[in-house]
Amino acid sequence: MREYGVPELRPLLCMGGVDMQSQLEVVKRGVHIVVATPGRLKDMLTKKKINLDNCRVAASVQVFNSRGGR
């Protein structure tokens, strides 16, 4: 895509059950978009591994299964 002048976007997927260290390595390189489960995001914020100082947009989505539960 770079050959067409499209800027590189660096995303991060943060979720529990995945080694946090590998997620933090991505953070150190810099990210543009973070998609995170609430628990992992709270954990990383509490441990001061990431911050939302430069966050421009935040969205929260609640997903329900077909049986009406979360």
Image (tube, rainbow, N blue to C red):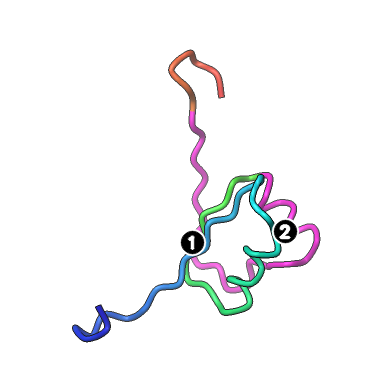
Residue, disc 1: 57
Residue 67 screen position, x and y as percent: 48, 13
Q: Is residue 62 magenta?
A: yes
Whether 38 is drawn above or below 23: the answer is: above
Q: Nearer the viewer, residue 27 or 70?
A: 27
Circles 1 and 2 in contact, beta carbons < 8 Å: no
Q: Secondary structure at mark 2?
A: helix
The answer for how far apart the CA atoms under marks 1 and 2 are is 18 Å
Identity of the residue furthest to the left in this view: 4
Task: Please indicate whether residue 13 sits to the left or right of residue 4 in the image.
Answer: right
Q: How busy is the neighbourhood of tag 2: few (under 14 within 10 Å), some, or many (20 plus)?
A: some
Residue bounds of the magenta highlight: 39-63
Q: Nearer the viewer, residue 29 or 42?
A: 29
Place residue 7 in its image quadrant.
bottom left
Most common secondary structure along the magenta stretch = loop
The residue that appears at 51% across and 55% down in the rendered structure is 35
Residue type at numbered disc 1:
Val
The residue type indicated by label 2 comes to Met
Question: To which residue does mark 2 refer?
Answer: 44
Image quarter where the C terminus lies is top right
How far across and how far down the image is residue 53, in percent? 64, 72
Q: Nearer the viewer, residue 56 or 21?
A: 21
> SS for tag 1?
loop
